[in-house]
Image: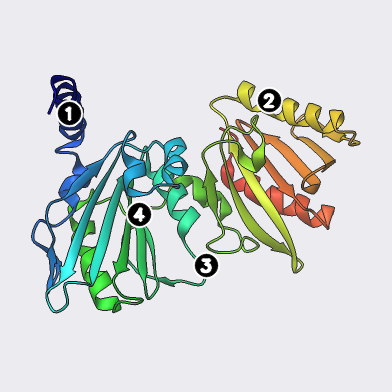
Amino acid sequence: MNPHAAAVVAFLLTMMASIHSQAAGHPAEKALPGQACADGWVLDGEVALFDKDSLFDRINGESELYFPYGFEVLAYARYESKKDRSIAVDADVYAMGSLLDAFGMFAKYRRRDAADSGVGAEGTITPSQLLFYQDRYLVRLQVTGAATLSQEVFLACARAIAKNLPGNRDRPKELDAFAVPAVVKKSERYIAQSMLGYDFFRRGLIADALVDKAPVQVFIVPEPSREGARRTYDRYRAYLKQSGSDVRVTETKDRVLFEAVDPLYGTVLVELAGRHLIGAVRVKDVKAARQLIEQLRSRVGLD
């Protein structure tokens, strides 16, 4: 090897060692069982760590989805079946920025028709995958080398990992606002940036609802302050006016609300409630949508 090539290799090895040392010892790594995750399913090799610079090596094409949600590190391990080494469980533990961020990524991947796993704060299980979040960690288990895997193996591995994570099994408190009859269960999502595709909605929560059997989407945009919420409200209203919509504003001592037609989402209602915006898009029945927003408002509060 010539001196130049040797220097390049030495540099790359130094960088890789530096990246590993920064992630080594992270709780995500310690969450993965060191010997076996279930009876007869043993660790193949060592736990591998991926940070922001190397995440694409593990999930090429999806890595950028995680960054707005405060991604820190991914710990990955492969657990082989002693009976058939070609079949394994791939276990991924993602350390996200917060409990809400972990939920946000969980909601991106969960399937509404999947059965509940009963692991973590929330979890789902299918014949090929188990997914759950707990505290600020997202855990994804997937079978490789086969199309399906028994639930017993998935659940044993999931419980072994959950036991090593922080014990907080609560859902994000922000989801409490959606605990009204009209909201469709398992439809809640947290969008960490540009909710509805608008940059003035920096982040927010959205869910599907049924109002007199008609589908509608409801959303909540939290801001750090009442002033910040007012600025976001005004920006959305200005955008709709510039789009040619007739924005009808109702403003009293206690309520600030507008109704308009969004060029992408049809009829929209938005209320300013303390440091939150509460809204509904794709509205068919304005009166019923107002009542739904009122229910959400009562649960959000006016802090």
Tag on residue 9? Answer: 1
User: Gap between marks 3 and 2, in whole Å?
Assistant: 34 Å
User: Disc 1 marks which amino acid?
Assistant: Val
Looking at marks 3 and 2 on the same chain, the residue that comes earlier in the sequence is marked by: 3
Give residue 12's quadrant in the image: top left
Mark in the foreground, 1 or 4: 1
User: Gap between marks 4 and 2, in whole Å?
Assistant: 33 Å
Looking at marks 4 and 2 on the same chain, the residue that comes earlier in the sequence is marked by: 4
What residue is rendered at 61% in x and 54% in y? Answer: 207
Residue for badge 3? 112
- Mark 4 and mark 3 residues within 8 Å of each other at the beta carbon: no
Residue for badge 2? 230
User: Gap between marks 1 and 3, in whole Å?
Assistant: 48 Å
Mark in the foreground, 3 or 2: 3
- Viewer-closest of 121 and 84: 84
Q: Secondary structure at mark 1?
A: helix
Quadrant where the N terminus is found in the figure: top left
Residue for badge 4? 133
Residue 6 in the image, given as x and y percentages of width and height: 14, 25
